[in-house]
Amino acid sequence: MKQLQCATFEGIEATQIRVEATFTKGLPSFSIVGVVNTAINEAKERVKSALLSNDFSFPPKRVTINLSPSDIKKEGSQFDLAIALLIALNQKELQIDEWFVFGELGLDGSVKENALFFPLILSLANQGRIAKAIVPNESIPKLSTIPSVVFVGVNTLNEAVNILQSDTPTVPPRKDTPDYPCLRINSATYFYEHVYAEDFLDVKGQDVAKRAALIAAAGMHNLLLEGSPGCGKSMIAKRLRYIMPPLHNSDILETAKLQVLDGKEPTFAPLRNFRAPHHSATNASIFGGGSHKAQIGEIGLSNKGILFFDELPHFSKSALEALREPLEDGKIRIARVNSKVEYTTDFLFIAAMNPCPCGNLLSHEKACRCSDLEIQRYKNRLSEPFLDRIDLYVQMQPVHVGDTVSCCSKDLHLNVIEAFRIQKERGQERLNGRLNDREIEQFCTLSAAAQDILEKATKNFALSFRSIKKVQKVARTIADLNHSEHIEKAHLLEALSFRRR
């Protein structure tokens, strides 16, 4: 029995699949077993045509292809090439079971690309399960960005057969690192890009909100913007992605994988994903799910990037309460009858809301049309446990004709990069907004004056344990932006000023 290796998806992670073949005496037949879907069953006709079109004989035996393990549902056309190779080489004594093979076959024996090859192989590489693979030649430019894997590109079935018979493949040149400006810290390399499709130069006034946006980006702190319609809440949120901290190559590849899963062409640029679901979106589309299979949702697709909720109180109560888990734990678990999947949700959460249903409560020019009861109902849509997970709260300033530009995205981005460098050189694996309790004790050291202010604030404002930790983390980021080794009184006071009242 010969076998090759391939893979299929379970959730958004790949599972290694062994493609096994046996040839037994009996009436000629061809069957594929192992809980396969229609696309894999249709592979029988593609494989037969590809073999006969390239002068291979189809064995006059009972041909059985098994995709193991058999308790996992398999889907996709990536198994075509592996199945054809096992049949073509059925009379050869070759040791080929360490090879991974991905490829969709044309009827003429051509090997075609599939958009899912990249996320499949990247997931296998992250698990340390793949060392070398035969793939379509047109996939090589994308796949060569994945480190520690040797890829051999083929255009036809005959080329793949020759590679397995010779075992001396010609390996194309690799592209291990992106061509972007980089920051080297403690033997690690982080990439960024000075491209600002949307610039903070477009936002006039709102100095406090822009300061909060800078702090949020530098430390990955969740941000809530409240203000009248048209004051610049959405403008600030959309420009935040361009001033975010640099990305490690593994993060760039993870972002590219999510782009492929979202049906987009991966860019491999050090630019974080930005997801902004509408408030009418269903819970399944936001968190992931489905009746038979747990599909990835907006929260999973925003991993390493930004999740923006505009008109926050208009989202359903169940969606807002379900958001508490990923905001706190950085993970979300989707359970269905046939599958249970866990997604990483390391995103920056940005939210925007009006001060009242009509939006004019803070306006000096327009009268608010809402009653006290309507305003209270509007505010009550956001529970205290949910709001307790917001690090920075900003009440936007009224818009004035004389408002001027105070900063540009490039200047803000340079500040974020410098704060990122300080955090990494301090030995932090995570940015300030993601520190756990032990790391807070280690890295968020307060001066005596700052400690005194924190104790008074805890007593006067009845701060919860979570709120105290969030104030410390925000103050740490402010200190980093000011190049201060310790958290001083001024840094803590500014952090407290962004506390929700």
Image: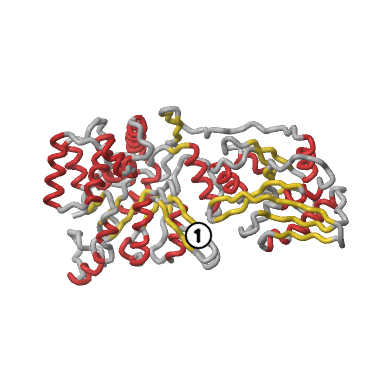
Residue lying at 37% horizontally and 48% vertically, measured from the top left:
348
Nearer-the-camera pick, 488 or 69: 69
Image quarter of the C terminus: bottom left
Q: Secondary structure at mark 1?
A: strand
**Residue drawn at x 55%, y 54% as measured from the top left:** 263
**Residue at which label 1 appears:** 340
In the rendered image, residue 37, in percent from the top left (x then y), is placed at: 66, 62
Instruction: Give the vertical position of 313 relative to 180 (above or below).
Output: below
Residue 32 x %, y %: 73, 59
Residue for point 66% across, 54% down: 68
Q: Quadrant of residue 45?
A: bottom right
Q: Say whether residue 237 is left or right of residue 338.
A: left
Q: Is residue 366 left or right of residue 29?
A: left
Residue 221 location, x and y as percent?
A: 31, 46
Residue 1 image offset from top left, x and y in percent = 77, 49
Is residue 333 left or right of 174 when viewed as pictured?
Answer: left
Residue 370 makes an appearance in the image: yes
* Label 1 CA crowd tier, 10 Å (few <14, some 14–19, many 20+): some
Q: How is the image coloured?
A: secondary structure
On screen, residue 286 versus residue 392, left or right, reads right
* Residue 415, quarter of picture: top left
Q: Is residue 201 visible?
A: no
The foreground one among 44 and 249 is 44
